[in-house]
Image: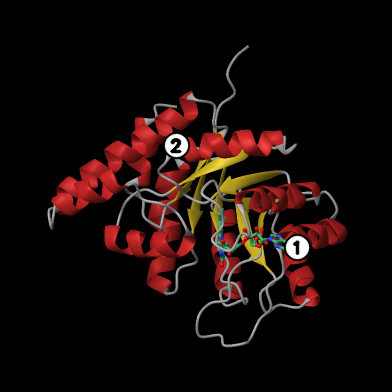
Amino acid sequence: MAKQKPRISFEYFPPKTAEGKSKLLEKTSPALLELEPDFFSVTYGAGGSTRDNTFGTVAGLRELGADVAPHLSFGGDDEAAITELLDRYQALGVKRLVALRGDIPSGMGGLGQLVYANELVEFVRKHSGDYFHIEVAAYPEIHPQADSYDADVYYLKKKLDAGADSAITQYFYNVESYFYFLDQCSAAGIDKPIYAGIMPITNFPNLARFSRNCGAEIPRWICQRIEGYGQDQESIRKFGIEIVSQLCQTLLESGAPGIHFYTMNQLEPTRTIRNNLGL
Ligand code: FAD
């Protein structure tokens, strides 16, 4: 039987400035569209902090003819605000969503309330029926607030059972963590696709800091190699492309259903890594 083409998607965050937005929509996106991704996704600041920017970025991508999955979470929004957003997305022809609990951004004090992603999925299904293809988040190295490994798998199943169609993982560099996670999910009765989230290496100090917070491990050998390059940015760039391309290649050869690239709104190195896969 012919192997199914892997699904490829590219994630953005909504740019804060007009300059960032025009770069994203006029330069980066047309170039990434040439790679024929299945869709783009646009993150959402929990607490509704990027509601308009996320919507504007999604609308801009729709004008380019792209399939887009806005991320969504309750955060500080009430049900009326979420239903309005769902209807506006539907009117734009958006057919996908990434449903999340989100995190309360620091600086919001006691504002905003976290609503588990399974409840948001239920809410969307109740309001919009089967219209949207809904993705949820999954954590091969386990969500930092999870009570246990099994509890996190249990709650992933709960989100999928509530009506989500598939999941996208937090980024990881340990390929074994992903395949072990798939086995555990399968043993728990999950039979929906779990796409691998991949973070190309751009700004290493930022990546290292962010990874500590979100519970993604950067293997010691990668840290050692990068630290050894010191300020030699060209060597870091080349090494990052090499190891992330290898990671993606191994994932696809070993049966991952597709890859979701956390682009950080940069054309490179995502484009080069995607091209290295020779799909
Ligand atoms: P949930 O699935 O609700 O889980 C949160 C935690 O609670 C987990 O520890 C879980 O084990 C536990 N849990 C889940 N359900 C229950 C329940 N019913 N009862 C008790 N415990 C439960 N963040 C943003 O702010 N904006 C974004 O756009 C964004 N996009 C993301 C995209 C992807 C693909 C990924 C992987 C993450 C993204 N995040 C985003 C980060 C995400 O919001 C955080 O990781 C957040 O802390 C958890 O969100 P979740 O949807 O996974 O939460």
**Does residue 6 appear in this view?**
yes
Task: Give the position of the N terminus as an image quadrant.
Answer: top right
For image coordinates 59% across by 14% down, the residue present is 2
Q: Amino acid at mark 2?
A: Val
> In the rendered picture of this protein, how many numbered marks are placed on residues?
2
Q: CB under 8 Å between callouts 1 and 2?
A: no
- Which of the 4 image quarters holds residue 46? bottom right
Residue 53, placed above or below residue 169: below
Question: What residue would you read off at disc 2?
Answer: 175
Residue 237, placed above or below residue 253: below
Residue at disc 1, secondary structure: helix
Label 1, residues with CA under 10 Å away: few <14, some 14-19, many ≥20: many
Is residue 129 toward the left or the right of residue 150 in the image?
right
CB of mark 1 near ligand 1 (< 8 Å): yes
Task: Give the position of the C terminus as an image quadrant.
Answer: top left
Cα–Cα span, label 1 and label 2: 30 Å
Query: Which one is earlier in the sequence, the residue at label 1 or at label 2?
Result: 1
Is residue 271 toward the left or the right of residue 233 in the image?
right
Q: Amino acid at mark 1?
A: Leu
Q: Nearer the viewer, residue 214 or 264?
A: 214
Q: Nearer the viewer, residue 11 or 247?
A: 247
Residue 101, placed above or below residue 187: below
Is residue 78 toward the left or the right of residue 242 in the image?
right
Residue at disc 2, secondary structure: helix
Question: What residue would you read off at disc 1?
Answer: 120
Residue 32 in the image: x percent, y percent? 43, 45
- Which of the 4 image quarters holds residue 108? bottom right
Residue 109 in the image: x percent, y percent? 57, 88
For image coordinates 51% across by 49% down, the residue present is 141
Quarter of the rendered structure image containing ligand 1? bottom right
